[in-house]
Amino acid sequence: MGVKSVENMDRLFWLGRYSERVYTTLKLYGQKFDSMIEEGTGGYDEFCRSLDIPNVYDSAAEFRRCYPFGADDPNSIYSNLIRAYDNAIELREEIGSDTLSYIQMAVYELKKAAGSNAPMIEFQAILDDILAFWGIVDDMIEDESTRNIIKVGKRVERIDLYGRLGVDRTAMAREVHRLTGRIPRTGLRYQKQVVDRLNELVEQPQLDYPAIVREIERIL
């Protein structure tokens, strides 16, 4: 496929990050959906705090409407999915139309969910579309570097989110080890000392989550 431009490498990396961000935040939102509505302000305020995003919502109803679907909310699931879609469109020649189509279907399902009183079915379809997207990245993209950059973006975002959410040590260590094995094969200019430090951090008996987030944010 030839030498990639720095711009396209960046798009591939962020395609991986945004697709993972949509997947994990939508999955978390679905798990917390009922309790957040029942708990009122406390429920969605804690949700925002856990993801380190500003709570700009005046009510549970506004949160329920704007966080998944808000085009003007830069932290919304919709905004992150559109960023993934925009990158995928620009990368059509590298990733192929079949791969792109699963991001397109996720956008369609999210717009459909916005008009539904019971959007959980559409939310599950979006999760399935993103899982299918990752699967077809493995199956249909021949260029190893292209696959690896998308996957590294996915891992970087997952480690960042796991650090904010305080996931258990086993899950965090698994993601850091996967990142460690893959990032040297991407051609990305990354900070090796950050990877080494992350590996040190996940070996500690008690995880220093803020330190993990700080390190992963400066990996490139």
Image (cartoon, rainbow, N blue to C red):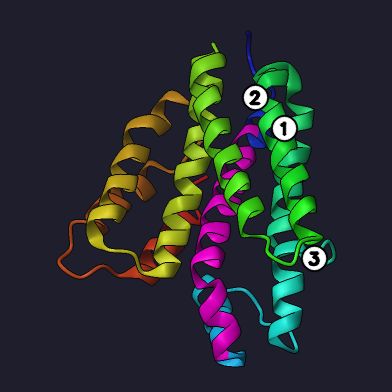
Q: Which residue is mark 1?
A: 88
Query: The residue under label 2 is which amino acid type?
Result: Thr
- The residue carrying mark 2 is 99
Q: Magenta segment: does it hold 24?
A: yes
Towards the viewer: 5 or 103: 103
Residue lying at 73% horizontally and 46% vertically, measured from the top left: 109
Q: Are marks 3 and 1 in contact (CB under 8 Å)?
A: no
Q: Which region shows up in magenta? A: 12-39
Residue 44 position, x and y percent, is 59, 82
Sequence-earlier tag: 2 or 1:
1
Amino acid on which the number 1 mark rests in the picture = Ala
Q: Quadrant of residue 8?
A: top right
Residue at 60% from the left image edge and 90% from the top image edge: 40
Above or below, 150 against 197 in this view is above
Q: Is residue 59 left or right of residue 215?
A: right
Q: Main secondary structure of the magenta part?
A: helix
Q: Which residue is mark 3?
A: 70
Q: Residue 17 at what x, y percent from top left? A: 57, 46
SS of the residue under disc 2: helix
Question: Which residue is at the far top?
Answer: 1
Q: Amino acid at mark 3?
A: Gly
